Image (cartoon, rainbow, N blue to C red):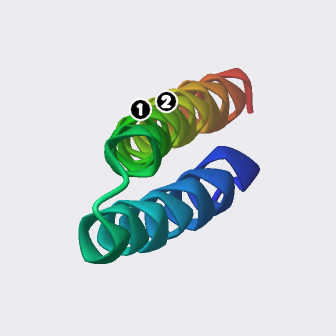
Amino acid sequence: MSDKNAEGKLDEGKGRVKEAAGSLTDDSSLKNEGKVDKAAGKTKQALGDAADKTGDAISGVADKAKKTVN
């Protein structure tokens, strides 16, 4: 798991807590802030997944190139 994935999960969890707290206290500002944090967390996770897949693909190409050279 990349750092972006971990950050994203943390932000998403923080957003869930803020959104729930905003709902319980009828604080629409806090609730909206929680929604923004959740969305940011999901975006970070998606970027982390894309980076992981790109890194894996590059490693695979490098391994094939090494085998071809040898």
Q: Is 32 left, or right, of 66 in this rendering?
A: left
Q: Indicate whether 64 appears above or below 56.
A: above
| Residue sitting nearer the eye, 28 or 60 | 28
Picture quadrant of residue 49: top left
Report x, y in % for residue 60: 52, 37
Task: Give the CA separation, mark 1 to mark 2.
Answer: 6 Å
Give residue 55's position: percent from left, percent from top.
Answer: 61, 34
Residue at point 66% right, 27% down? 62
Q: What element carries label 2?
A: helix
Q: What residue type is labelled 1?
A: Thr
Task: From the viewer's side, name the closer residue of 18 and 64.
Answer: 18
Query: In the displayed structure, would residue 36 be above or below residue 38?
Result: above
- Name which residue lies at 51% across and 27% down: 54
Q: How crowded is mark 1: few (under 14 residues within 10 Å), some or many (20 or more)?
A: some
Q: Residues within 10 Å of mark 2 (few under 14, many from 20)?
A: some
Report helix, strand or loop for mark 1: helix
Residue type (three-letter) at the residue carrying disc 2: Leu
Q: In which quarter of the image is the N terminus?
A: bottom right
Q: Which residue lies furthest to the front in this view?
A: 26
**Residue 63 found in image quarter:** top right
Circle number at residue 21? none
The percent position of residue 3, horizontal first and vertical second, equals 74, 53
Quadrant showing the C terminus: top right
Between 27 and 63, which is closer to the camera in this rendering? 27
Residue that label 1 marks: 43
Give x and y (percent) for residue 18.
47, 63
Vertical placement of residue 52 versus 19, above or below? above
Q: Name the residue under label 2.
A: 47
Whether pointer 1 and pointer 2 mark residues with C-beta atoms closer than 8 Å, the reply is: yes
Q: Which residue is drawn at 41% across and 32% down?
A: 43
